[in-house]
Image: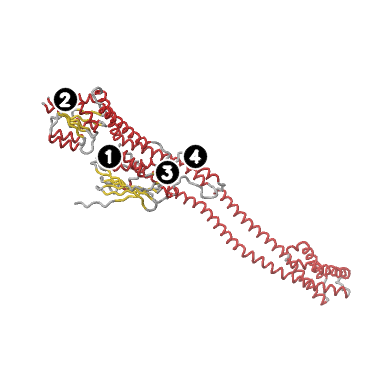
Amino acid sequence: MKPADPPATVRAPGAGSAGPEGRRDRKDPNLAERLREAEAALVRRPRLSIRLRMVASLVLCFLASGAFSLGAFILLRKAEVKLHLLQTLERLDDRLLRVRALEDEKILSRADVDRALDGVRQADALLRSGSHALQEADRAIVPALLLQLGTCDRLLSVVRGAAEVGGRPGALSARDGAELRRAEAEGNRLLEVIIRRERSSLDGILRFAETGPLVLLGLQLVLFVGIILAFAKALVNPIRRFEGYTARIAAGDFSFITPTRRYRDEFSDLAVGVNQMLGELQAQQHRLVKGAKLAVVGTLTSGIAHELNNPLNNVAITTEALMEDLPTLSDKEKWRLLQDIYFETERASEIVKSLLDFTRQEKGEMVAVDLADVLGSTLRLAQNEMNLNNVSFTCQMPPDLPRVRGAANQLRQVFLNLLLNAIQAMPGGGRVWVSAGPQDEGKVCVEIRDEGTGIPAEVLPRIFDPFFTTKEPGQGTGLGLSVSLSIIRTFGGDMQVVSSLGRGTTVHTCLPRADEG
Amino acid sequence: MSEDRDVMVLDDEPIVGDRLRPALEKEGFTVEVFTDSAMAISRLKEKSFGVLVTDMKMRGPSGMDVLRFVREKAPKTQVIVITGYATIETSHEASAWGAYQFVAKPFKLKELVKLVDKAAKAATA
């Protein structure tokens, strides 16, 4: 004896890729309206395009380097002025020292006096025009220095004037000579203070000019890294997000993309485009569900024709009997025949009503649905199909079955599909078990089990694919299970199929409870 | 031959038997009515009928099963098959198995009685 194959299980594909909270689309007929709303929400945000951010970053980089260059230029200019000043002051200092030394030796030449005077005047002019290049502390002593230089200038001019006349620099009066010496000494002292301070200031500037470029390089590195990271974020994050969108769209969740950021950019334009595509997909999905429903009605046609022809025939032959035998029938018999006609008419209209209930367009709004009602009416609809195929059913439901979230008519379509599949899996007749009950995680599950041929393990993973069918051409569209799954997913539920070849198939359909909020 | 006037009516719709019985009895037929095909088959094992009027689709053995059974056990019995949903395939199958006539629902009482009469005569011939 061949050992029985272990039962194979297939979960509906893409399960868990998007939870019920991700499914915001409640198939309301105002698809165009919702599409417009989603687009308005996306477009309403202030625009901050990636292109604008790129241009802004480049401008920022340019301005930063420009500022650094300007700073360097100003610094160099300052150093240059300072160097010039320093040279002049050093020269003057030197000359004054020399004048003082030669005066002491009494061998002062006319050229020395000329050079000293020249240095005094140059320094005087420079200090008057370029004292801004000096340190704050040095600027404070400039007036004192100028005073001493003025004295030097005046007295040295007298000395030189004497030299002009006499060939050799003449001596000053004792008082003027002492004053000149004092002024020269004080000038030397002040000059040396200034020179020392300015030299160290220039050294500082030069050190700064040496280390500055390294700091600048570091700062630029930080700036570039910051810009690159910002752009990576602006480009990669939306791409990741769109990856997520495509995954959930592939799993059958066609809800619109809603804004996640405060600004809109080129990706928002893409989102608007994707939403348009999603709108089209939703419309397509609605058409598919409708088409699959009509296909089911087509499957039911023979059963329904048979079911309708029986009461019609009963009415016809009873009426005929009544007309034929009217004079000879007793009142009691006439009453019985009329009663037959009445009830058979009722029966026919019930059949038409259940069919109309099934095909009627409903809004598809999510409401609390009584599963027992839905399963009951579906079983009635499939009853004749079962009779014709020698299939009987057992239905087990607790009396206090919680309501589920969904739309009765679409659930009826799903369960009718499953029942018809079960019937078709048992060409020689058999039994279908239908049971429902609450499950954990706030779900209510319906189990439809047949004892039919079962589904081969290699086929099982494909049974939810659209247009996949194992039936003969013309017998099935291959849309039943895929549409059923999309309906159940829309309601936040899921389906699972367990099948064992030769033993039968069980389909679990789980839906969230209605009282879960 | 008295046995040719014996008619069995088999339909899981009780009203069909209820209406056919008086109409056929008025024409002098002896009528046995069944609504369950398995019971009808066991009756057919005991007794042969001139004409069998049977529905096609029924719970349990179908009209086609009953037709095959009758063809084997009582080749002289004429079988009229009535059906709520006539397709070319089923009518071909019924003819292939030697059904006398194939009648679609809804039918006329008078016409069916006439047909049974003709079939009974064919059975006698």
Find disc 4 in the rendering and name its residue: A33
Q: Position of residue A261 (x, y in %)?
A: 53, 50
Question: What is the three-letter code of the residue carrying label 4?
Answer: Glu
In the image as oriented, which residue stretches furthest toward the bottom? A105
Q: Which mark is residue A49?
A: none
- At horizontal 66% and vertical 57% (from top left) the residue drawn is A70
Instruction: State the scheme by which the image is colored.
Output: secondary structure
Q: Nearer the viewer, mark 3 or mark 4?
A: 3
Mark 3 nearby-residue class (10 Å; few <14, some 14–19, many ≥20): some
Mark 1 nearby-residue class (10 Å; few <14, some 14–19, many ≥20): many
Quarter of the figure with residue B106: top left
Q: Which mark is residue A367?
A: 3
Give the mark count: 4
In the image as oriented, which residue stretches furthest toward the front? A331
**Residue closest to the eye, A204 or A15:** A15
Residues marked 2 and 3, same chain: no
Label 2 chain ID? B
Horizontal side, residue A51 vs residue A512: left or right? right
- At horizontal 18% and vertical 33% (from top left) the residue drawn is B67
Horizontal side, residue B73 vs residue A106: left or right? left
Question: What is the three-letter code of the residue carrying label 3?
Answer: Val
Find disc 2 in the rendering and name its residue: B28
**Residue closest to the eye, A333 or A478:** A333
Secondary structure at badge 3 equals: strand
- Kindly report the distance in space between the C-alpha atoms of the residues bearing marks 2 and 3: 62 Å
**Residue closest to the eye, A505 or A430:** A430
Mark 4 nearby-residue class (10 Å; few <14, some 14–19, many ≥20): few
Mark 2 nearby-residue class (10 Å; few <14, some 14–19, many ≥20): few
Question: What is the three-letter code of the residue carrying label 2?
Answer: Gly
Q: Which mark is residue A386?
A: 1
